[in-house]
Image: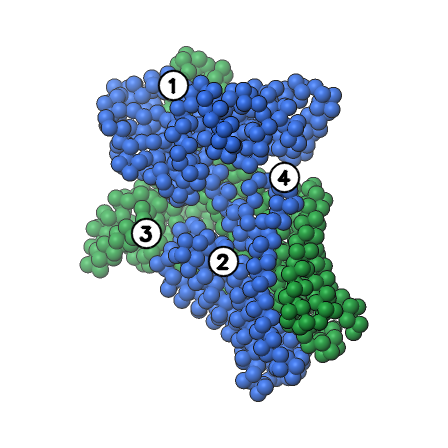
Chain colours: A blue, B green
Amino acid sequence: MTTSTLNDILAQIRAALKQEDLTRAASIIEKLRPADQAELFSELDEETQAALLPKLAPEDSADILEELEEEEAAELAAYLPTNTLIRIVDEMEPDEAADLLGDISAEQARQILDGMEDPEDIRPLLLHPDDSAGGLMTSEFLALRRRATAGDALEAIRQWRPNDEFIYYMFVIDPNQRLVGVVSLRELVVADPATPLSEIMNPEVISVKAGADQEDAAQVMFRYDLLALPVVTDDSTLLGVITIADVMDVLEDEATEDIQRLGGAQPLDRAYLNTSVLTITRKRIGWLLMLFLTATLTGSVMRLFQGELQAVVALSIFIPLLIGTGGNAGSQTTATVIRALATGDVDINDALRVWWHEARIGLLLGLGMAIAAYIRAITWESDPALAMTVAASILGIVLWATGTGALLPLIAEKAGIDPTVVSGPAMSTLVDATGLFIYFTIARVMLGL
Amino acid sequence: MTTSTLNDILAQIRAALKQEDLTRAASIIEKLRPADQAELFSELDEETQAALLPKLAPEDSADILEELEEEEAAELAAYLPTNTLIRIVDEMEPDEAADLLGDISAEQARQILDGMEDPEDIRPLLLHPDDSAGGLMTSEFLALRRRATAGDALEAIRQWRPNDEFIYYMFVIDPNQRLVGVVSLRELVVADPATPLSEIMNPEVISVKAGADQEDAAQVMFRYDLLALPVVTDDSTLLGVITIADVMDVLEDEATEDIQRLGGAQPLDRAYLNTSVLTITRKRIGWLLMLFLTATLTGSVMRLFQGELQAVVALSIFIPLLIGTGGNAGSQTTATVIRALATGDVDINDALRVWWHEARIGLLLGLGMAIAAYIRAITWESDPALAMTVAASILGIVLWATGTGALLPLIAEKAGIDPTVVSGPAMSTLVDATGLFIYFTIARVMLGL
């Protein structure tokens, strides 16, 4: 649905709300698809949301709470009476319900669980951290025995009528609940109904441990093109299933976080325009201040060489050019290396190869930039010694920046820090200070200061 | 599969190759999953790849060519004899095969099509650009008539035995081939076999036009949690289907491109370590030189204020600090806005709201940074007028940087340029020059120069 269509519908809803006709507003929303419902809904203020939600069918309310950003959903839930919330949570996917209960007060969560028809789907999911494979999985899945036939399995699906469209894989377990195989709905349909599952199933089933990082689970599904990934305990007991819909959300969120961190800001928990000015400021100022403190290092380097600066004021003209080029060359390298780490093209064991790759690239880039810098310097100041100083410095700075840019993300990864944190602004600041040191040292030698 | 396991297997393959035992090397590879096969394969040099590929079963070779980066696959194909290639392409998914044929020479592509058993699956796909919805779709899909029953449909699936695991949705067409509904395999299985499809199908089927951008198609599938998206002509004739596996690749590639562009480098077409030093240098140097040229603007600003610099050399000490903070504040803003654009949280019509959001954030951040800058300046130079100059400048620079950072990506989007191109390094360079202008102008007034 296009933005303009959504805006038209939003106008209709606002008109209905103005006439205090909540029922009409609700009926407009109920006609939409869940993603559109959530988008429109998050445009309304919280009071209106809380008034409108109980007017919707519980399935629609459940869809909206699932589609909203987690923080928005939790805030809205805190506004709603417990009875309303119980009816809605009963309709939510168990994994989404568990995430929501983890985000609201423990007291409210307990009341909801106590009031629910079937809390047993959700309780075990509450034990796993949100960002683990166990936190991502749903407990709604179909586990079948090996001796069951294809016909039995199809009958079980007919009986079960799962409401999740995404369940197209059935898992086969042994008498101890251990995962032993996987069979797709397609294979069941194509097989002779009398065939036992042990003959149709693929015993080479890929699974993850419940404690695994959700990003790793997403990477596995992505790499092997899986629509469903079973989650198991250490002794292979089947606990739940991660669906492709869950994983698409993880991949998009991770990419968003990486990009925001590359820009030097802590990731936001909710949509940009719905995040308050104060929250965004709080998420950015710490980083700006830290970079400011490290940047004072650059000032200290300049104070160290104040004599040289006083002697040749023209030296200062090239400072932004030199540190700018160093920062840019370094950013190019870190962006490439970070993404190669994220997609698995590169890992820590490749450190030496990556560094050697970047050292040669840095040499070529540095030589190219040195020529450009010499030409610029000679036309500005027509002093060959100064021009040579600038050219030699830019070669040194680019080499240093690409080398540092290659190793910093790998060192961070090794140390268990998110590599995006050390790149971008942080790397630029480091390269600024050390770049100036290179520049003034070369100037001291070449200009005989 | 972990990296160390892959490395062990790679060592086994290398050992087999050393003994020129291609059959053993092939049999090791054939036991692996396609993604692992491709990863190992791309570690080998092209000559070995070309020698090994004909030894593998055509299905395995087809899997490997599908999983390799497009450029690598095309180069490898150019090495292979046409007869071998025909057998392999026959086994590939039609959309992947069409992509490959588009990447090799027209002459070789024609010979392959002429030699294939069933080129009619591929020919129509060659008409669509690679990065359009039509280029992403497969022509392997099941289209059913409205009057067919659920039982007929299941029988059709049994007859058809599609090799693509991802086809769990069947599309319903009218006698003019126009798309009128969608039905899932789950619904077919659950329904009474005698029910006509017109009663089970969902007539509200979401589709895209063949000419639509592949990113837009991916966003639609992602937004509405679709496993398959039908591609139609302008008059709704069903042409093909995009599967979730195709779209996951698009989303990962797009995120990679965004991150590489944010770092100021043109995206790479193949895995990082497999891209030559020369190619990477070529992709980066243009951008570095362009930024260098714009950065000379900063030098020009400094030359303009050379008198002031000569009079108060201490002014130069704060230059890296001020332009660094401006660049960082601007990057934080652009990264957030670009990602909000990519995920659809924000669009061009929100420009004013985004600017107003960032103006207030900039004011708060600027005030915070001004206090920090005043303290730093007074402890370094103990000159209150200079410290006030630095503090006032940083407030002005941060306000300017957040405002520019908010609007630049939106202007780029409006102008049809990828917003990531104008952000990061480009924005820093712009903010550097203008930031210095703000600084020296304030210094001129406050220090009476």
Q: Which mark is residue A160?
A: 1
Residue on which the image places disc 4: A274
Give the chain letter at badge 4: A
The disc placed on residue B3 is 3
Can the viewer see residue A49?
A: yes
| Image coordinates for residue A202, horizontal then vertical, percent | 28, 33
- Disc 2 on helix, strand or loop? helix
Left or right, B419 with respect to B301, comes to left
Could you give the CA–CA distance between mark 2 and mark 3, rounded to whole angstroms?
24 Å
- Is there CB contact under 8 Å for labels 1 and 2? no
Q: Amino acid at mark 1?
A: Trp
Along the line of sight, which residue is nearer the eye, A409 or B365? B365
Residue B379: give x, y in percent of width and height: 64, 69
Distance Cα–Cα, label 2 vs label 4: 28 Å
Q: CA distance from mark 1 to mark 3?
A: 40 Å
- Give me the chain letter of mark 3: B
Nearer-N-terminus badge (2/4) = 4
Front-most of residues A270 and A34: A270
User: Foreground mark, 4 or 1?
Assistant: 4
Instruction: Give the image location of residue B2, x and y in percent.
Output: 32, 49
| Residue A311, above or below A51 | below
Q: Give the labeled residue for mark 2.
A: A422
Q: Residue furthest bottom?
A: A448
How many residues crowd mark 3 within 10 Å: few (<14), some (14–19), many (20+)? Answer: few
